[in-house]
Image (cartoon, grey):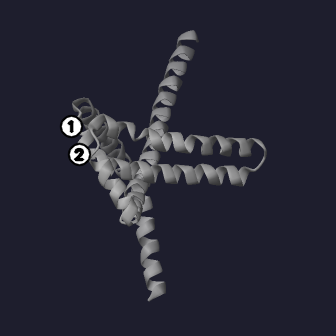
Amino acid sequence: MGATLSRWVRWLLKSLRGLLGSLGIWLIGLVLLFEEWGWEYLARVLAWIGRLPGLRWIEGRIRTLPPYAALGLFVVPILTLLPLKLLALYWLGKGHTLLGISVIIAAKVGGTATTARLFMLTQPTLMRLAWFARWFGRWMAFKNTVLARIKGSRAWQRWTRFKSRVKRLYRKLRA
């Protein structure tokens, strides 16, 4: 009986490890998908805003920063948004749930947009740092592997088909 119980426990732990690994990949994948979508879309929005005369000058200056100054620039959104996030947590603690969640979402979107635009402006400079280029390459390989796994799943395929049907229906209704 003890040997059977031991095998059963090992099987259960192995199954849980596999399940948690799959859930972890899906959670990472969902975050990466949001970041990828938000990164590109929000960066385009900020690029459009960046065409304003004063901001065009600032973006030009950012492009000419030396590598470590460009890297240090990424601290600005973190330091700027930290007080907002702490305020949102305070509001959540005081029972202002909708307000707190709204501020957290706005900070996430604003932070993603700002970081995306800063990275687009500084990427050529940052790639001159050998260690940064190496880690960036590793990050992109990891990200692409996770996204390929997610996009190759049955759930993703079903979602894609469903989304296509909804788009076709929407076009028919508009026509």
**Any part of residue 171 in sight:** yes
**Any part of residue 34 in sight:** no
Which residue position holds label 2?
Answer: 124
In this view, 159 is above or below 76:
below
Residue 128 disc label: 1
Circle 2: element type:
helix
Q: Position of residue 125 (x, y in %)?
A: 24, 42
Q: Quadrant of residue 48?
A: bottom left
Crowding at mark 1 (Cα within 10 Å: few <14, some 14-19, many 20+): few
Total marks drawn?
A: 2
Q: Position of residue 63 (x, y in %)?
A: 28, 49
Q: Quadrant of the C terminus?
A: bottom left
Circle 1: element type:
loop
Crowding at mark 2 (Cα within 10 Å: few <14, some 14-19, many 20+): few
For the point 45% across and 33% down, the residue is 21
Q: Position of residue 164 (x, y in %)?
A: 41, 70
Task: Name the one closer to the observer, 142 or 81.
Answer: 81
For the point 67% across and 44% down, the residue is 87
Mark 1 vs 2: CB contact within 8 A: yes
Give, as a three-letter code, the residue at label 2: Pro
Q: Position of residue 171 (x, y in %)?
A: 43, 81
Marks 1 and 2, how far apart at CA:
7 Å
Give, as a three-letter code, the residue at label 1: Arg
